[in-house]
Image: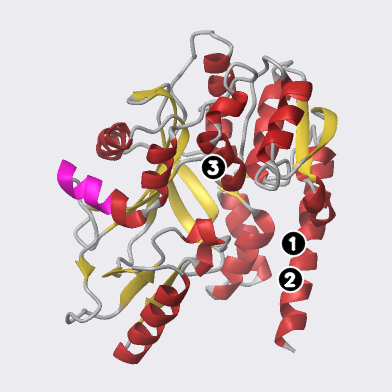
């Protein structure tokens, strides 16, 4: 399991470890000082330092062959996933991984390309505008591929409410990455469809969640979400992913519009932040991917709707930003119990690593503002 610093990677370690699979967690040497949750897990049977994939591709391939010969490998971070997609001859036949072709991965990362494919399929998308055209406000300015720039989710787009802000945001984004997008602003709730594809057009299971809160508010990833059922989203997402030709983990993000319909936002061709919710609800995607990689028949049992997940620290901050106090938030948690994304009774140490890292980042951010 590569890129052990991520919550999704910790979820992979726990999912497989609880099923008796011996899991080795690996992280780049230059990332260890940030806190590695996967290393803290009791289910990590080995903790490995891996070379940076892009620094020396042949050296990384040699490390893979030495440490993971003929074993399933899970690349979690996008940089590592891109390395696997673009250097298949260096690892194919040595290790086993569910990785899309480079052109499929590039298309999925490019919001404009995803928009074009969706339009060709007749799927609902946000209205899109040219820079010089009249734009109804508020609107959203987006990078075509913000994750490729190393940006956090909340930094990959900006909601603009007047013409001056629109022009400034577009100029700023275009200077950093050509041809940013301008789209209509959709204030409704967010939904996500998730799966693992054994091959293009072959999802092994389906999962849908609804975003209840996000942090930072108005643009961050989910801090509070619930599993739900939306057959329409499943059908549309499966068609889109098949057209893109993706393989491996994928999550399709949607927004609900004022009329109650759904509009496509983007595709994440990797394990996603609400993966712990899918596993808690019974859609154990790491285990399903492992079954595919080991030649077993994936057991895609139906998941449970109504299961809730919180990133407790971030969700409290999101609730506080919406006006909730400590007492009110605790009452909500009692009335709507759910799973915590990082804390686990049988594996408590990663939560301490996560909390320390979050507090350290907040301290750095506040220090930078002084």
- State the residue at coordinates (73%, 28%): 62
Helix, strand or loop status at disc 1: helix
**Mark nearer the N terminus (1 vs 3):** 3
Q: Is residue 120 magenta?
A: yes
Residue depth check, mark 3 versus mark 2: number of the one nearer the observer: 3
Marks 1/2 in contact by CB < 8 Å: the verdict is yes
Foreground residue, 142 or 353? 142
Residue 218 visible in image: yes
| Alpha carbon separation for disc pair 1 and 3 | 27 Å
- State the residue at coordinates (52%, 73%): 322
Principal secondary structure, stretch drawn in magenta: helix
Residue with the mark numbered 1: 358
Query: Which stretch did the figure color magenta?
Result: 115-121
Foreground residue, 94 or 298? 94
Residue with the mark numbered 2: 362
| Left or right: where 22 falls relative to 136 | right
Helix, strand or loop status at disc 3: helix
Point out residue 205 in the picture as x, y percentages from the top left corner: 42, 24
Residue 161 visible in image: no
Q: Is residue 113 magenta?
A: no
User: For mark 3, does the 10 Å Cα neighbourhood hold few (<14), some (14 to 19), or many (20 or more) residues?
Assistant: many
For residue 368, what is the image quadrant? bottom right
Q: Quadrant of the N terminus?
A: top right
Residue depth check, mark 1 versus mark 3: number of the one nearer the observer: 3
**Mark nearer the N terminus (3 vs 2):** 3
Helix, strand or loop status at disc 2: helix
Point out residue 223 in the picture as x, y percentages from the top left corner: 57, 56
- State the residue at coordinates (34%, 32%): 245
Point out residue 136 in the picture as x, y percentages from the top left corner: 21, 79
- State the residue at coordinates (48%, 45%): 226
| Left or right: where 192 falls relative to 273 | left
Residue with the mark numbered 3: 82
């Amino acid at each position: 399991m590569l890129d052990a610093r991520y919550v999704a990677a910790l979820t992979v370690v726990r999912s497989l470890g609880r099923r008796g699979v011996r899991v080795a967690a690996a992280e780049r040497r230059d990332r260890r000082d940030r806190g590695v949750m996967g290393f803290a897990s009791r289910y990590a049977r080995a903790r490995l330092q891996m070379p940076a994939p892009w620094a020396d591709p042949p050296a990384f391939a040699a490390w893979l062959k030495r440490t993971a010969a003929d074993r399933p490998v899970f690349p979690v971070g996008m940089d590592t996933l891109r390395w696997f997609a673009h250097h298949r001859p260096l690892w194919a036949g040595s290790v086993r991984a569910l990785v899309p072709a480079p052109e499929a991965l590039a298309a999925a990362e490019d919001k404009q390309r995803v928009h074009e494919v969706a339009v060709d399929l007749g799927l609902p998308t946000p209205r899109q505008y040219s820079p010089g055209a009249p734009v109804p406000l508020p609107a959203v300015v987006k990078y075509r591929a913000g994750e490729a720039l190393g940006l956090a989710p909340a930094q990959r787009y900006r909601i603009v409410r007047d013409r001056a802000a629109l022009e400034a945001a577009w100029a700023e984004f275009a200077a950093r990455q050509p041809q940013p997008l301008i789209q209509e602003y959709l204030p409704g709730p967010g939904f996500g469809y998730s799966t693992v594809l054994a091959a293009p057009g072959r999802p092994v299971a389906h999962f849908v969640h609804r975003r209840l809160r996000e942090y930072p508010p108005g643009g961050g990833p989910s801090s509070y979400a619930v599993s739900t059922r939306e057959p329409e989203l499943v059908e549309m997402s499966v068609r889109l992913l098949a057209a893109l030709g993706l393989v491996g983990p994928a999550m399709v993000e949607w927004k609900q519009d004022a009329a109650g319909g759904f509009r496509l936002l983007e595709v994440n061709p990797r394990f996603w932040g609400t993966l712990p919710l899918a596993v808690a609800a019974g859609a154990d995607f790491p285990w399903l991917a492992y079954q595919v990689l080991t030649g077993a028949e994936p057991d895609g049992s139906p998941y449970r709707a109504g299961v809730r997940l919180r990133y407790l620290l971030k969700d409290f901050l999101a609730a506080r930003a919406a006006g909730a106090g400590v007492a009110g938030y605790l009452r909500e948690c009692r009335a709507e119990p759910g799973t915590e994304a990082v804390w686990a009774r049988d594996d408590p140490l990663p939560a301490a690593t996560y909390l320390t890292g979050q507090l350290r980042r907040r301290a750095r951010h506040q220090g930078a503002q002084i």
